[in-house]
Every structure is written in C-alpha cells, then in structure tokens.
Image: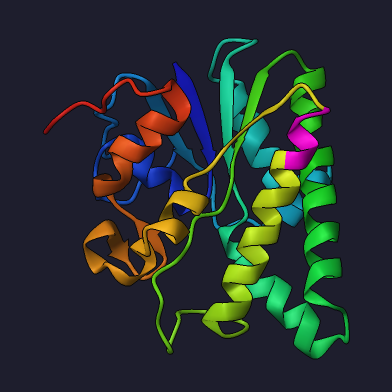
Amino acid sequence: MIYCIGTSHVTVFSGRDVESNGFPNVHGDVLPEFRTAHVNGFLAYSIGDENHRAHKEIHRILEQIPQGSSLLFVFGEVDCRAQIPKHKDAYGSSLERATHYVVERYVQGVMRYVAEGYDVSVWGPHAIYRADDIWRAAGPWEDIIAAAALFNWLLQFQSQFLPIRYFSIFKWMMANRIYEDKSYYRDPTHINRKCLPQIYNTIFNGIPAPSD
C-alpha cells in the first residue's frame, strides 16, 4: 500500500476523477495499491518548514497509518505554476535559481520522514495543459513547463544519492505532446484516470492499471 500525500494532484491515485478530500478520502479510493491524502494546496517549498501548517497536516495523516509505511509525496505543480515564475519576474531571481531553492527545501523536508522510518518516494510535477489563460499562473506556459522540467531533473538527480525514490510521467507527457490533448486532463492543471496506465508502468514496471 502506498499512501499518496499532497495537493489535489493526489486525486489521480484514487482511481476517480472526483477530487480527493481529506484522509481517509471521503469520496473513496478505488485502486488497491494507493490511498490518497489531500492535505491542501501547499507548496513543496513549505514542506521543509517545521513551523508551517503543511508539516502539521502531514503528521496528522501519519498518525493514522502504520509506522514505516510507503509514502509518495505529491507536491511541486503549484510551485511551478504559481510561485517560481513570479520569483523570476517580480523579484529579479532567475527561474533556475528559484527552482533550485524550492527543490532543496522540499528534499530537506521529505528526508525528515525518511529519518522517521518511512519508505519515501516523490512524484515529480506533470505537464499542465497548454493554454494561454492558465488558472492562478504566475507566468506563461513556457515558464511553467521550464520550471517543471528543472524541478523533475533536480528530484531525479538528488534521488540517486538519497534513500528516496523518484517517479514522474513528465517526460512521457512532453515526448507524446500529452499537454495538447484535453482527454488526459480533469481540468487544465489536473491529469485524470486516462494517465493511469503510464503511472502504473512508471511505478510498478509495467504491471497494468486496473480497468474500469
């Protein structure tokens, strides 16, 4: 069993296209391999702050699951869409520098749960649907995708030297131009169940996703 903890993007792991809510998910999780815990639209950046509400919400979830469980942290899309481009434009910081700083804080935060004895993985941000008018975006689609690409690369690179695993379908989405196909999205920023076969292939090495 993998407990998926994060923003509303955990919803795809529920096997439903109704947004996950709370823990246990009040709408029910139908995939046997996953349980979702939607803690809020917190930033990955905030996970490294022990005084932030995100930290408290995650520990509230952990009190309800067995010690040493497998955790999959699903954060980062909000940072790439709503925060990192703003730092580049508003504060004079480069997109690269802002992304490095966010990922550094995020990795420090999730490593805390490794130290507490959990089996930890991170899910890299996906490619949002390509559009000119993006909900709560701090920059154009191109900047958001550039931030997501670097965010994923940094997570993948760091996971090689740390006791955490990294999973993502970002490269698959970009290579196959999924970001231009609305049928893969619940809305412009959330993927839907149509992505599950690739998610299962990525996490479980080709084991097929359950059919409807």
Q: Is residue 83 left or right of residue 51?
A: left
- Most foreground residue, 129 or 28: 129
Q: Residue furthest left?
A: 212
149 falls in the magenta region: no
- Most foreground residue, 48 or 64: 48
Residue 24 point in image, percent of width and height: 40, 30
Quadrant for residue 27, please give it.
top left
Q: Residue at x 66, y 24 (%)?
A: 120
- Looking at the rendering, the stretch of residues picked out in magenta corresponds to 157-161
160 falls in the magenta region: yes
- Most foreground residue, 189 or 61: 189
Q: Main secondary structure of the magenta part?
A: helix
Is residue 26 visible from the viewing direction of this image? no
Q: Residue at x 30, y 61 (%)?
A: 185
Q: Quadrant of the N terminus?
A: top left
Q: Is residue 127 above or below residue 112?
A: below
Quadrant for residue 149, please give it.
bottom right
Which colouring convention does the figure follow?
rainbow
Residue 180 point in image, percent of width and height: 33, 71
Q: Is residue 16 above or below residue 200?
A: below
Q: Residue at x 24, y 48 (%)?
A: 194
Quadrant for residue 22, please give it.
top left
Residue 186 point in image, percent of width and height: 28, 60
Q: Is residue 47 left or right of residue 171?
A: right
Q: Is residue 115 above or below residue 160?
A: above
Q: Is residue 96 left or right of residue 181?
A: right
